[in-house]
Image (cartoon, grey):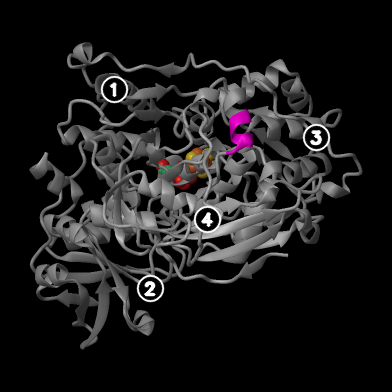
């Protein structure tokens, strides 16, 4: 059913992909040649509170008076539980920064950044850079929407171009129509089954085909959202009549513009997905690409069902769950958590009667926030099974190390609520309750705060609580690497492994404190050992396998190791956002030339690169001497001239400070 068809060479005389048209309209540096470095102008930015405080501290350090984008949004959605003073202090800081620097702010309780941005601010044809990996969600509106580290977003707010590798574009051709009980989540889980979470760095998925007509914007958003799990640069949908209807329902049809690829556009690859042939799927523990059919998992007892997150929390999805559960009560074993994606979703559900159905079914309704998705609340019990409509089921992310988390569609989640076991929703024995998207949502932006006008803004005081520390400084790259392998880790190490979220997330604005938890789940002795090596004037080196730095965009996964004196990572391969973050904070992302060398390295080995600065400046291959084992091996460091300058300066902030 899913078929890979033909591979074409790029040819300048043929039609353009929508992705390359969007890039062309924003090109600030470089040429549209897949694989080469380009810079693009950024129209819109978004931050959320967990990455935003650091992004704004860095923006402040640049000394710019006001943001230079068309729109910059600051969302408060990740840390809203507020146990202790830290989160509330962060919110207060974010409020004052937004008013001072020309940023619009979505208050805590107004919803999850990606859902609110889709509803209220995303615009076809624009670029959006967000300090959250799921910023790609707005690709559903025909935007070029990309996730990045906070420092890159701060630079975009300062009017600097965003640099990335010009992507290779894969066309995903959707044909047919989804059968009842099968939904957008099953489409993206199918793509994760085909493409996995590895090997897609530097690619964009561009969707097309007659099957698109049957997918609403929120359904497209589910698919674009989990492009992050594929490791894509982003995902792009055309802006068509469906997009126009959605924007009209949001009372902003004027923001619509029709956009599509040229009919003769040439793609790297074309994948055909027949929507009619899809079945309900699940991502099994502990990776979003560990896919099975729901039917083959049927009967597994379920303890918890969490419906929400930025992946599946739209009005139509929650209304569908409400209709499935109408007249039913959650199975006694199942704790049902429902998190609407935005206050708009919640209010529309309430006004149209669906909220009452959910409450009558025993739903534990939470504030519109990230909550359970990031282990910020509702951690499941020991060894329990949790079915979630979110996008990541990495080991321990729920806050419970030994929980078994499955990612499923809202329909499959609702079926398990009713029966208490994993159930293919087609086996519920009821007709599919099709819920239409309203022609008009009830729209209310009262929780979006406007910035102060420029003449008043200058006198606004920035409010910093005791948890908010300035970003630590880093010196220029040393002349010589005198290092030790402080930790050796395996494949698919996520940024959740490097910098845990959940209960630790409240230290996001306090790097010195947050650094106490680097690699906490893998080796809690790492921070103390690393700090000792740093304090002895030596360098820490991390050795890793494939796809190092998957998942979250949190730059803390580079910033805290930098603070602890990590100067290099040597891995088999890296994910996109984390590579950029390592470079931004002056850490070398080195790649084994021969992967078998990984097997010959051990924790505690002393590593040396004599002329480090010279080697980085000339680029390409570097020789690392393992003094403990008495042998040398080759690593590569493929860098653009811009990246070399950043690394030599000891990070992007050092470079910018000298320039601005
Ligand atoms: C996530 O889903 O992992 C997060 C929390 O939204 C992160 C951002 C963060 O770590 O603050 C992301 O996806 O980038
Ligand atoms: Fe929030 Fe989860 Fe979405 Fe990240 S993936 S933005 S934590 S809802």
Residue closer to the observer: 583 or 53:
583
Direction from residue 603 to residue 213 in the image, left or right: right
Identified at 50% across, 43% down, the residue is 139
Judge whether 53 appears above or below 482 on screen.
above
The secondary structure type at the circle numbered 3 is loop
Which mark sits nearer the N-terminus, 2 or 4? 4
Q: Return the residue at label 3.
A: 434
Judge whether 652 appears above or below 272 on screen.
above
The residue segment tinted magenta is 240-245
Q: Return the residue at label 1.
A: 102
The secondary structure type at the circle numbered 1 is loop
Labels 1, 4: front one: 4
Disc 2 Cβ-to-ligand 1 distance below 8 Å? no
Distance between mark 1 and mark 4 Cα atoms: 33 Å
Say if mark 1 contacts mark 2, CB within 8 Å. no
Judge whether 454 appears above or below 489 on screen.
above
Q: Return the residue at label 2.
A: 572
């Amino acid at each position: 059913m899913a078929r890979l068809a033909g591979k074409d060479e790029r040819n300048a005389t043929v039609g353009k992909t929508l992705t390359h048209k969007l890039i062309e309209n924003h090109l600030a540096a470089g040429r549209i040649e897949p694989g080469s470095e380009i810079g693009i102008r950024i129209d819109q930015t978004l931050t959320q509170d967990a990455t935003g405080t650091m992004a704004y501290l860095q923006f402040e350090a640049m000394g710019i008076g006001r943001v230079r984008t068309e729109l910059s949004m600051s969302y408060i959605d990740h840390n809203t539980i507020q146990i202790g003073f830290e989160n509330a202090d962060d919110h207060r800081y974010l409020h004052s920064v937004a008013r001072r620097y020309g940023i619009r702010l979505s208050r805590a309780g107004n919803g999850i950044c990606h859902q609110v941005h889709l509803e209220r601010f995303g615009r076809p044809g624009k670029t959006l850079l967000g300090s959250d990996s799921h910023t790609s969600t707005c690709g559903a509106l025909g935007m070029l929407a990309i996730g990045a580290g906070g420092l890159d977003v701060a630079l975009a707010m300062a009017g600097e171009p965003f640099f990335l590798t010009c992507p290779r574009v894969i066309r995903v051709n959707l044909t047919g129509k989804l059968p009842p009980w099968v939904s957008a989540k099953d489409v993206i889980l199918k793509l994760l089954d085909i493409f996995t979470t590895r090997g897609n760095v530097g690619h964009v998925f561009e969707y097309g085909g007659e099957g698109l007509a049957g997918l609403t914007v929120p359904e497209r958003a589910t698919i674009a959202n989990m492009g992050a799990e594929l490791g894509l640069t982003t995902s792009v949908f055309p802006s068509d009549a469906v997009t126009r209807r959605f924007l009209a329902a949001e009372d902003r049809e004027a923001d619509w513009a029709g956009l599509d690829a040229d009919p003769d556009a040439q793609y790297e690859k074309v994948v055909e997905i027949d929507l009619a042939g899809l079945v309900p799927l699940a991502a099994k523990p502990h990776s979003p690409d560990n896919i099975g059919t729901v039917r083959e998992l049927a009967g597994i007892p379920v303890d918890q069902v969490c419906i929400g997150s930025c992946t599946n929390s739209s009005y139509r999805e929650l209304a569908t769950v409400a209709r499935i559960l109408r007249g039913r009560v959650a199975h006694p074993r199942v704790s049902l958590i429902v998190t609407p994606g935005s206050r708009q979703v919640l209010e529309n559900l309430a006004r149209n009667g669906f909220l009452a159905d959910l409450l009558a079914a025993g739903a534990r309704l939470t504030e519109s926030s990230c909550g359970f998705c990031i282990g910020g609340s509702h951690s499941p019990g020991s060894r329990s099974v949790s079915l979630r409509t979110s996008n990541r089921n990495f080991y321990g992310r729920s806050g419970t190390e030994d929980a078994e988390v499955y990612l499923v569609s809202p329909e499959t989640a609702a079926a398990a609520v009713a029966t208490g076991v994993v159930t293919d929703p087609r086996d519920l024995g009821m007709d599919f309750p099709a819920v239409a998207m309203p022609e008009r949502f009830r729209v209310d932006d009262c929780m979006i705060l406007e910035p102060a006008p420029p003449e008043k803004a200058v006198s606004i005081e920035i409010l910093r609580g005791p948890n908010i520390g300035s970003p630590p400084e880093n010196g220029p790259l040393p002349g010589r690497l005198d290092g030790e392998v402080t930790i050796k880790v395996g494949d698919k190490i996520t940024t959740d492994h490097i910098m845990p979220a959940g209960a630790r997330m409240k230290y996001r604005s306090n790097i010195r404190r947050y650094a106490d938890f680097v690699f906490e789940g893998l080796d809690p002795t790492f921070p103390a050992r690393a700090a000792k090596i740093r304090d002895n004037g030596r360098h820490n080196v991390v050795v890793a396998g494939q796809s190092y730095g998957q998942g979250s965009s949190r730059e803390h996964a580079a910033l805290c190791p930098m603070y602890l004196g990590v100067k290099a990572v040597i891995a088999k391969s890296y994910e996109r956002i984390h590579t950029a973050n390592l470079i931004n904070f002056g850490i070398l992302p080195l790649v084994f030339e021969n992967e078998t060398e990984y097997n010959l390295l051990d924790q505690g080995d002393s590593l040396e690169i004599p002329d480090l600065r010279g080697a980085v400046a000339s680029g390409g291959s570097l020789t690392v001497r393992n003094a403990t084992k008495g042998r040398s091996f080759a690593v590569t460091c493929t860098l653009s001239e811009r990246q070399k300058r950043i690394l030599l300066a000891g990070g992007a902030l050092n470079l910018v400070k000298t320039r601005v």
